[in-house]
Amino acid sequence: MSFDYAPFFRDDLPPAAKPWGGFPKYNFVGGNNDADSVPVTALLAALGTAMARDGQQLANYGMESGAQGYLPLRNYIATMLEDRAGMATDPGNILITTGSLQGLDLVNGAMLLPGDTVIVEEVSYGGTLSRLRRCGVGYEAVKVDQGGMCMTHLASVLADLAAKGITSKFIYTIPTVQNPSGTVMSVERRQTMLDLARQYGVPIFEDDCYADLLWEGDRPASIRSMDRGGDHGGQVIYCGTFSKSIAPALRVGYVVADWPVLSRLVPLKTDGGSGALEQMALAEYCPGQFDNHVNELRAVLKTKAEAMSDALEEQFGAAAEFTRPGGGIFIWITLPNVVDTDRLAQIAGAQGVAINPGSEWSADPDSGRHRLRLCFGQASPDNIREGVARLAEICHSEFGVPLRGANVER
Ligand SMILES: Cc1ncc(COP(=O)(O)O)c(C=O)c1O
């Protein structure tokens, strides 16, 4: 009998993990990427070059760049954000983090106390919603339509909170390829959000995780880039990541904020610095190759998005409502009300088809009960087609939706 730790653990821990049992046959969950697109050879060469030059800096925590991360990488991020997001950035205002998830944790850690209020999109990143819950924070959900967060609703939520004497700690938004809705917020809405944030004195937390993966239309200027002029500036905290544009296992993300904010985040990053090798490889690889790489990756993801959209139309017909993605790695789908996607996820998961139920991606879990999110980043087009057909079969046999499952005479 091994020692019983149960009485020693905090009683508010999340459910215990299960040992990893490998990927399911059809893996449509999480934010994994296309394996063949990882630029392995070029990253290896870049790491060799950077190590030959700066390898001895590994003797120091933070190398010779201090607690904010490897300076050549911060210099590249600053240039890249100016070119790609219209955001003039001082490398001194960048903090490299272990994935943007650490960025979320640092901002939450610096700003949130139990009982605080945060404004979120009504459907939002599950990792953010679960974090806010664990912080004991209440969130106000703002409607999302085809253009992202609705500004008339945001205005009324801010006014209602103000009437109650509550100031939201921040407005958390994923404006470009929103997770999970896939929507892209227009520049006009971004400006309105900024105007409202200024009017009510609320910071904006802009999570731009997927902005590099847009293949339909131009990438809009980031909200942070618009936060300049007059007496204004510094009201937007921005976070980004190389997880979606290069590879999630690298665990390299970044927060961009003015020094009054960044100087409060740095002391909370108590891990001795993010891993040096991945920062060195990226700093060497990205300046000459990031743009081409991302263009190629987008083309691969677009093909997969089309394969999944076609398969959904073919297998589910009118039963599955969704918008064909203009970027990103996932599709947000609404099924008829009879389908409980929590149950569907359980049953399909047991049969090798992993899906994210909509409840995990909804501020009000009940409202997501007949929705689901499917990720097409990792699976091949053939695997996507087979997996969606299998999902339709399972859904049909459990819920009678679609009316006829795959392989049944139409
Ligand atoms: C909106 C959003 N923010 C942050 C993250 C975390 O990404 P990272 O791998 O950079 O920690 C994800 C991951 O899927 C995400 O979807």
Image (cartoon, rainbow, N blue to C red):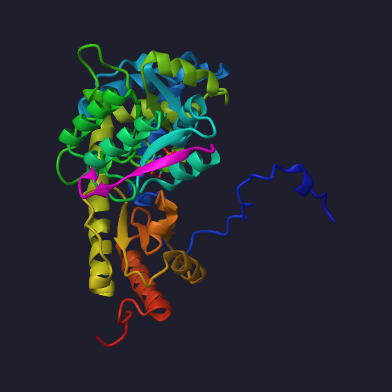
Residue placed most toward the observer, 36 or 401: 401
Would residue 251 be visible to someone looking at this image? Answer: no
Question: Is 167 situated above or below 33?
Answer: above
Is residue 289 toward the left or the right of residue 265 in the image? left
Residue placed most toward the observer, 224 or 387: 224
- Give how far across and how far down residue 349 sits, in percent: 49, 66
Question: Is 41 situated above or below 195?
Answer: below
Residue at the image point whose x is 62% and y is 56% from the top: 18
Is 164 inside the magenta-drawn segment?
A: no
Is residue 214 toward the left or the right of residue 103 in the image? left
Is 146 inside the magenta-drawn segment?
A: yes
Residue 319 is drawn in which quadrant?
Answer: bottom left
- Give how far across and how far down residue 58 sits, in percent: 53, 20
Query: Looking at the image, in which quadrant does ligand 1 appear?
Result: top left
Quadrant housing the C terminus: bottom left
Residue at the image point whose x is 50% and y is 40% from the top: 131
- Give how far across and how far down residue 236 sits, in percent: 32, 25
Residue at the image point whose x is 33% and y is 60% from the top: 380
Question: Is 118 situated above or below 79?
Answer: below
Is residue 197 toward the left or the right of residue 365 in the image? left
Q: Which residues are magenta?
A: 135-148
Q: Residue furthest bottom?
A: 409
